[in-house]
Image (spheres, rainbow, N blue to C red):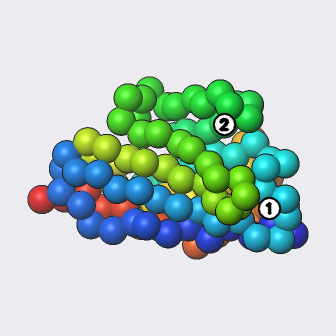
Amino acid sequence: QVQFVESGGGLVQPGGPLRLSCTASGSRFSAYGMGWYRQAPGKQRELVARFSSPIITMYADSVKGRFTIFRDNPKNTLYLQMNNLKPEDTAVYYCNTVPAPPPGTAPNWGQGTQVTVSS
């Protein structure tokens, strides 16, 4: 069963960059359509970036032009490069398959990585 471990979060000032990583274990990474999600306090988890095909990427309007999703299949790793960060980007970021698995089904959600954008 595939497991995801997210890393790279932290505290960053508005306008700054951050790169997140998601390492998958337990299954063949490239077999899945993958995406990055985030959940801010009091809000539902939302999809912010995804691979809609092996080479085509899609982004939520709120991050378009600032975030870039890319992957290294041999390393089983998914990345999210975030530039020009804004306070509203503050959230816990997760990776998982797209569409997201129904509650209680695999792949399980990882612990996520906290991103805080603040001066």
Q: Secondary structure at mark 2?
A: strand
Quadrant of the rendering where the C terminus is positioned: bottom left
Q: Position of residue 1 (x, y in %)?
A: 87, 69
Which element carries disc 1, helix, strand or loop? loop
Give the Cα separation between the discs numbered 1 and 2: 17 Å
Q: Amino acid at mark 2?
A: Phe
Residue occupying image coordinates x 40% and y 66%: 9
Residue 42 appears in which quarter of the rendering? bottom left
The nearer-to-camera label among 1 and 2 is: 2
Residue at 74% from the left image edge and 31% from the top image edge: 53
- Residue that appears at 74% across and 35% down: 54
Asked whether residue 42 is in view, the answer is no
> Mark 1 — residue?
107
Residue assigned mark 2: 51
Residue type, mark 1 in image: Pro
x and y, in percent, of residue 104 in the image: 81, 64
Location of residue 74 in the rendering, given as x and y in whole percent from the top left corner: 73, 58
Picture quadrant of residue 4: bottom right
Residue 111: quadrant of the picture: bottom right
Residue 81 appears in the picture as rendered = yes
User: In the drawing, does residue 61 fall left or right of residue 50?
Assistant: left
Above or below residue 81? Residue 75 is: below
